[in-house]
Amino acid sequence: LLERGEIQPESIAWPCLADYRAEGGYTLLQAMRAKAVSVEALSEMLQAAGLRGLGGAGFPAWRKWQAVRAEPAPRYMVINADEGEPGTFKDLYYLEQAPHRFLEGALISATAIDASALYIYLRDEYPGLRRVLRETIAELETAALVAPGFIVLRRGAGAYICGEESALIESLEGKPGKPRHRPPFVAQVGLFDRPTLVNNVETVYWIPVLYAKGADWFAAQGRNGRQGLRSFSVSGRVKTPGVHLAPAGITLNELVDEFCGGMAEGHRLLAYLPGGASGGILPASKADVPLDFDTLQPHGCFIGSAAVIVVSDQDDLRSVAKNLMAFFADESCGQCTPCRVGTEKMLTLLDSAEWDATQLRRLAQVMQDASICGLGQAAPNPVTSLLTFFPAELAHQGVRVRETGDV
């Protein structure tokens, strides 16, 4: 059943190739191949629209094209569909609802860098999507829209660390999924030691949409001085959780009220995680901060993949911190000491009846400064956020916090 993708055989229905082409699908891809639309023109469009990587880092999409195109062939294209950040499920939604639009965007990106092959690294916990992608890829090959074997679908093994692009590439090569030291970056030395473009599912999904509607349309969608649209994976204490497409720069209060039907009955907003497990935790008093790239950093947080987890006054903050830290400790690849030992040590400190804030902050600083990749660097964020913004709430919930010296 797993191999056939029949865990939920009746729940996934997606537009077939004929339906997508009837709506104008793959016209941009064919125009690129016919040289009717240049890579330079598309790159300028992405720049004007302000499209950035929507998997976490937010690197401008056009700059990635530019960096990889500047390197000698052969080059490879890799799609990061290893959606492992707790609270994130937007890529699952787009792959289920519009696989051909995603594939067109991926093939456009592959064409832009003249890739020799396109690899899709799919999260192991999405078995139903393997059937969706296998069948849509087969449709493309039958219609001669892509050469047989050009698109390679690979299945992950459930490791969170493989969401990090260099660890993902190591896994694709058949090695343990452990991050590489950088430089060199994957744009120069990536898959099979060749220049590689790595994009998130949602990032490439938007490319044909932007071309059809225009860069100005996309850029005008934001709020509070921001540009574009964001797909928020909202979970927690709201009436209507799910994937909500909303203007970039929307605030948490606006997102909950306008898109999520308000807070769940009997729950009052206490805190929220704007970027999944690794994005930090903000108090209700900061629910009017715009949610976008660069807006949350002054508060010690980041939006990442826009996985918004809403925490209420009914939730225990110590349990939130311990649960998140246990996740990071379990998912650490063990390559570097600050992450491997730091996550376990921090989890032990959180188990104490009294939190030593000084020791927690010192440990967090070491992990942020010395870990090889973003997992170890971001793992302390929930704890440092609680120490910064929630001393009164922690005390009210029975957590004693003491300072033992300078950090």
Image (tube, grey):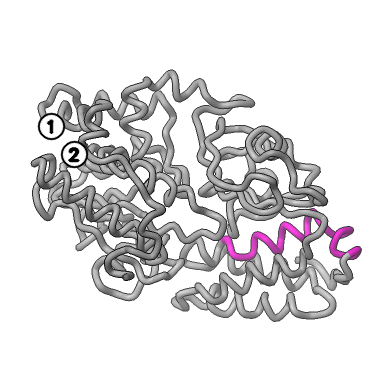
Q: Amino acid at mark 2?
A: Thr
Question: Mark 1, residues whose alpha carbon is within 10 Å: few (<14), some, or many (≥20)?
Answer: some
Can you say whether 286 is above or below 384 in the image?
Answer: above
327 or 14: nearer the viewer: 14
Q: Quadrant of residue 51?
A: top left
Earlier in the chain: of badge 1 and badge 2, it is 1
- Image coordinates of residue 265 in percent, x first then y, are 79, 48
Residue 111, numbered circle: 2
Say if mark 1 contacts mark 2, CB within 8 Å: yes
x%, y% of residue 302? 59, 48
Q: Nearer the viewer, residue 253 or 21?
A: 21
Taking the view exactly as shown, the residue that stands out farthest to the front is 10
Residue 4 is inside the magenta segment? no
Res. 122 in view? yes
Disc number placed over residue 7 in the picture, else none: none
Residue at 34% across, 35% down: 62
Q: Residue at x 72, y 37 (%)?
A: 253
In space, the residues marked 1 and 2 are separated at their CA atoms by 8 Å
Read off the magenta span: 378-396
The residue under label 1 is which amino acid type? Arg
Q: From the top left corner, tell me how far across and down residue 176 is, in percent.
A: 33, 75
The quadrant the N terminus occupies is bottom left
Kind of element beneath mark 2: helix
Q: Nearer the viewer, residue 367 or 130?
A: 130
Viewer-closest of 129 and 306? 129
Quarter placement of the C terminus = bottom right
Q: Residue at x 42, y 51 (%)?
A: 92
Kindly report the secondary structure that dominates the magenta region of the rendered protein.
helix
Q: Which residue is mark 1?
A: 33
